[in-house]
Amino acid sequence: MTNLSSKTTTRAEHELLVRCLTPERTAENAERIRDLVLQKLDWEYLFVFARRHSVVSLLYSRLQETASNSVPPDEFKRLQKYFQENAARNVLLSAELCRLIDLLKANEIEAIPYKGPALALFAYGQVALRRFVDLDIMVRKEDVERAIELLISQGYEPSKPLNESQRNVLLRTQHNVQFRRHNKQLIVELHWEVASHLFASSVQADDLWKKLVSIELNGRSVKTIAPEDLLFSLCVHGSRHLWERLLWICDIGWIVANHDLDWQVLCARARSTRTERMFLLGLHLAAKLLDTNLPGTVRKEIEADRALDDLAGDVIQTLFAQVDHVPATAAQIMKYNLRVRRTWWARARYFRQALRPTDRDLDGISLPGSLTFGYYVVRPFRLLRQTVGSLTDGSSNSRHEK
């Protein structure tokens, strides 16, 4: 087990949480969990910290297995209440996901669940063990327009109002669009690719649809993306958001622990898309924090890239630095994205793709179809203003570009 105290913190709450998140169940780990529970812990801090990282359900589940009689009764009840409420909410979201997939199918649009309930089942074996706040549905790009109209017919509306020309720009430059219903209580992200080109061409959409696998969701069989495609896209997703949540590292560790993966295919894809460091960082974090057992060939690739240890160390330090989430500044985001790419070609590609308009650019100005090139003109100035502001103000509230 990683010794957090020697790297990031001396808090027993952090060690207890990480030990409760490991996919492997060993007698030694269970004994250490029981020892930590008997210490004088700040249970309020532990709950808030676990909630910030979306891992309360995993924490409760492991404590319930190993030390339920030793946890202070009021604290155990609070964890149990959160677990039960999350489980109930996940059941409702899963039902809505199946309903929407059926609706799309009835209109001759093939759709697959991506992340959300499908990921919870695939990684943890139970929908209740993962926290998710939205539903991700993937369709083929040629079906996006019809899928949008169907979602609107069901009472969903775009999270940011877009006219037709703005929507067309997003279809060219991004990989998803978000919808909401019931005052944001239901959020659906409609995908046509698994990741933005800004980060990696990790999974070609045409290849993805050829390798779907079946899972049981709400008592029925549904198709979702193959385990190798899922793991790779999760590594890209974690990098996209600077690995700011322990949950994303848990997803990696639990998938690796619970599934047989074609590592030769995965490593070949990383090399062909020049995303080796991005891919290996997710695995390295899972190994360092959760003791995830990686194949020897993967461990050798990690050891050969000296920058990975420094990157992982910085991520871990940030994860455990404070209980509240402080968004990275634009300057920090840029620095990270340069470090997580090995080659100058990959870094140049990042800068080029970073200039493609996002929904935030479109939200700021509405241009007619004949002038949509203006979004490309405006974006560099917005990014420059954002970066300069974060350099001069360490408390900047910049958010990740989507």
Image: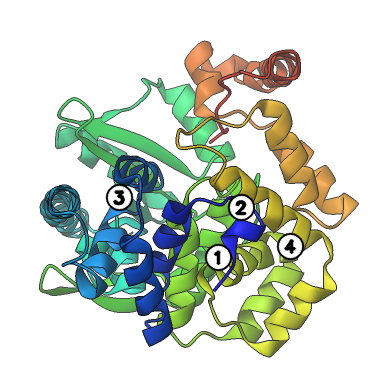
Left or right of residue 262: residue 87: left
Q: Secondary structure at mark 3?
A: loop
Judging by the rendered image, the residue that carries numbered circle 1 is: 289
Q: Residues within 10 Å of mark 1 (few under 14, many from 20)?
A: many
Judging by the rendered image, the residue that carries numbered circle 2 is: 316
Q: Residues within 10 Å of mark 4 (few under 14, many from 20)?
A: many
Judging by the rendered image, the residue that carries numbered circle 3 is: 132
Circle nearer the N terminus (1, 4): 4
The amino acid type found where label 2 is placed reads Ile
Q: Residue at x 59, y 57 (%)?
A: 5
Quarter of the figure with residue 289: bottom right
Q: What number is the disc on residue 277?
A: 4
Percent x, y of residue 364: 52, 12
- Would residue 44 be visible to someone looking at this image? yes
Residue toward you, 356 or 7: 7
Q: Residues within 10 Å of mark 3 (few under 14, many from 20)?
A: some
Tell me how far mark 1 sits from mark 4, CA to CA.
18 Å
Percent x, y of residue 203: 57, 64
Circle nearer the N terminus (2, 3): 3
Percent x, y of residue 305: 82, 68
Residue toward you, 332 or 167: 332
Q: Is residue 401 above or below residue 69?
A: above
